[in-house]
Image (cartoon, rainbow, N blue to C red):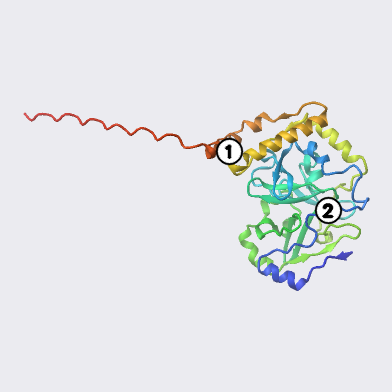
Amino acid sequence: MMRLGFSRAAGMAAMLALAIPAFGCGGSDTSTNTAANASDVTADVFTAALAGYGAWVDVAPYGKVWQPSPDLVGPDFVPYATDGHWAVNDDGDWVFASKHDDEFGWAVYHYGRWAYSDDFGYVWVPGTEWAPAWVQWAYGAGYVAWAALPPDGVTWTPERWTVVEEGHFTDDNLIAVRLAPERYTSIWATITPITTVHSGAHFIVGPPASHWKSVVKVSIGRPAAGAISARVKSIVAKTGGKVIVAKPRAAASVKASVNVSAAVSGAVGAAVGGSAHVDAKDAKSPAAKGAAAAASAAVKKPGAAPPPEKKKAAPPEKKKK
């Protein structure tokens, strides 16, 4: 095992100040380690495979990123917490077993980084190096904390972390036992960051699996060369070239998301040897219509002022008898 350059004293001081430290392995995962990178994995290989389960959008400064469809994961999605649980693979490493593994979990929980956009929520930034989980960890005093590794130069604020009592760490529905961020202040003062990096790779190891008596074991490991290409072809054939339209949280992002969706549609069409189609349900959803209407209203020029309201004539007075 090797350790990242991280001062425990400095790290604990940072946690006490509620500024969670970046552990030094943020967004760059372009290692030339052939054991970690299958020869058929490039950033572009994910475009067609994930287009049917989320939207590709442009988010500065990362470029093209992927937003999981809220119809699949819900509006309050948190990576490595929603719709899944922690398990141990054949190598003894922690992996996030997602109910969406066959759809998109095989990619977004083993490659790349996660960023947060005010417009789109959590978005996935593609990468090409495989790991059991790209996560930063903290552990101790009866708690386990983790957060998806962000891109280089990004340090998560406390609410972007997931903290659970250690007795619930292996629960099936982690998002249900996630502690409220208001409780984090006292927890950071006693919890210890894990900075040990797996030998021969670049991912941070989690808490010792031996601490839990009952841990689910899964066969999720580094894919063999050619496996990713085969998986992508299978997924694209299954989704039929469907392209999801982004559901932005801010009306100002509607135009950008439509432009990117059109570009992705072309890429998916090329992958399936035909033309891709946009999910009509997504495009016609109340959320999409409402965002588009808001964006349209935001750029409309003010029209002429309405004519003044005519005053109604007062009713005639009744004559006194």
Q: CA distance from mark 1 to mark 2?
A: 35 Å
Side of 78 where 303 appears, left or right: left
Figure quadrant of the N terminus: bottom right
Question: Against 199, is 11 above or below?
Answer: below
Q: Earlier in the sequence, mark 1 or mark 2?
A: 2
Tell how many labels.
2
Locate residue 41, reporting x and y percent.
87, 43
Which residue is at a point 78% across and 62% down the rendered structure image?
A: 23
SS at mark 2? loop
Q: Residues within 10 Å of mark 2 (few under 14, many from 20)?
A: many
Residue 80 visible, this orientation:
no
Which residue is at a point 45% across and 34% down the rendered structure image?
A: 303
Which residue is at a point 66% across and 42% down the rendered structure image?
A: 74
Q: Nearer the viewer, residue 113 or 152?
A: 152
Locate residue 194, reporting x and y percent.
79, 64
Locate residue 213, reporting x and y percent.
81, 58
Displayed quadrant of residue 307: top left
Side of 274 where 67 appears, left or right: left
Locate residue 245, reporting x and y percent.
68, 35
Q: Nearer the viewer, residue 225 or 125?
A: 125
Q: Amino acid at mark 1?
A: Ala
Q: Residues within 10 Å of mark 1 (few under 14, many from 20)?
A: many
Q: Amino acid at mark 2?
A: Asp
Residue labelled with disc 2: 29
Is mark 1 in CB contact (under 8 Å) with mark 2?
no
SS at mark 1? helix
Question: Against 36, is 207 above or below?
Answer: below
Question: Disc number at residue 291?
Answer: 1
